[in-house]
Image (spheres, rainbow, N blue to C red):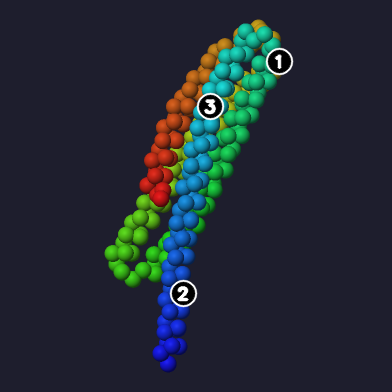
């Protein structure tokens, strides 16, 4: 009887060990998926800062360009690049929220099974911090996306005006408008740098 009991006990112990490892690993993987998405957002935001600079340069190059058509195509490309990045930031923000929600749901379920009060309090407090971080980060990204939309909208209106009067005199008439858009783009660059730093600081609280 000793041998069967030993085998059964060992099997149960191994099963519990594997279950524990799976839960721990799954939790770690879930939080890694969320933070990796935040890294992706930071990278897209940084790319957007470079593209905002390209937009400003392209607008400035319109006046005095030897090849007006080419300068206009470069300006058009700078707008389309910025639109693409803005869409990617918004898409990654949705992915971040989806992954975070999945993690929180399972985290809450697993925490509910804890019997030790202190362990439960620690888990609940940490989960609350995670939820607050994701919510705050999402709000910051949404605010930044709204500013992207404003700059892109103004840049596209300028593109329409210039495309219908693609002459040196027509471009000169947009001096004030180009200056306003450049100012908006500079402000967005500053806001982007600040938001990116805030996302990084929030992410590092849950980075392994």
What label does residue 167 carry, if any? none
Q: Where is residue 73 in the image (x, y as percent from the top left)?
A: 68, 20
Q: How crowded is mark 3: few (under 14 residues within 10 Å), some or many (20 or more)?
A: few
Q: Residue at x 39, y 69 (%)?
A: 113
Q: Is residue 179 above or below residue 87?
A: above
Q: Which residue is drawn at 69% across and 16% down?
A: 70
Mark 3–mark 1 distance (CA, rounded to whole Å):
23 Å
- Reading the image, the residue beneath label 1 is 69
Q: Are marks 2 and 1 in contact (CB under 8 Å)?
A: no
- Reading the image, the residue beneath label 2 is 15
Task: Answer with mark 2 or mark 1, whichever residue precedes in sequence.
Answer: 2
Q: How many marks?
A: 3
Q: Can residue 159 be seen?
A: no
Q: In this view, does 174 lie to the left or right of 133?
A: right
Judged by depth in the image, the label closer to the viewer, 3 or 1, is 3
What label does residue 50 carry, if any? 3
Mark 2–mark 3 distance (CA, rounded to whole Å):
52 Å
Q: Residue at x 33, y 71 (%)?
A: 115
Q: Can residue 37 be seen?
A: yes
């Amino acid at each position: 009887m000793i041998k069967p009991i030993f085998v059964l006990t060992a099997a149960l112990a191994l099963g519990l060990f594997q279950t524990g490892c799976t839960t721990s690993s799954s939790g770690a993987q879930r939080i890694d998926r969320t933070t990796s998405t935040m890294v992706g957002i930071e990278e897209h935001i940084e790319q957007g800062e470079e593209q905002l600079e390209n937009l400003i340069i392209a607008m400035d190059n319109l006046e005095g360009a030897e090849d007006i058509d080419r300068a206009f195509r470069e300006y058009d490309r700078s707008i389309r690049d910025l639109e693409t990045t803005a869409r990617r930031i918004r898409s990654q923000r949705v992915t971040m929220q989806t992954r975070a929600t999945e993690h929180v749901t399972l985290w809450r379920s697993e925490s509910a099974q804890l019997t030790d009060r202190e362990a439960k309090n620690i888990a609940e407090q940490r989960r609350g911090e995670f939820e607050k971080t994701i919510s705050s980060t999402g709000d910051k990204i949404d605010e930044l996306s709204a500013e992207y939309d404003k700059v892109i909208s103004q840049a596209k209106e300028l593109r329409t005006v210039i495309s219908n009067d693609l002459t040196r005199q027509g471009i000169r008439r947009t001096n004030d408008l180009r200056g306003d858009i450049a100012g908006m783009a500079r402000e967005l660059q500053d806001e982007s740098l600040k938001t990116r730093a805030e996302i990084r600081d929030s992410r590092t609280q849950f980075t392994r």
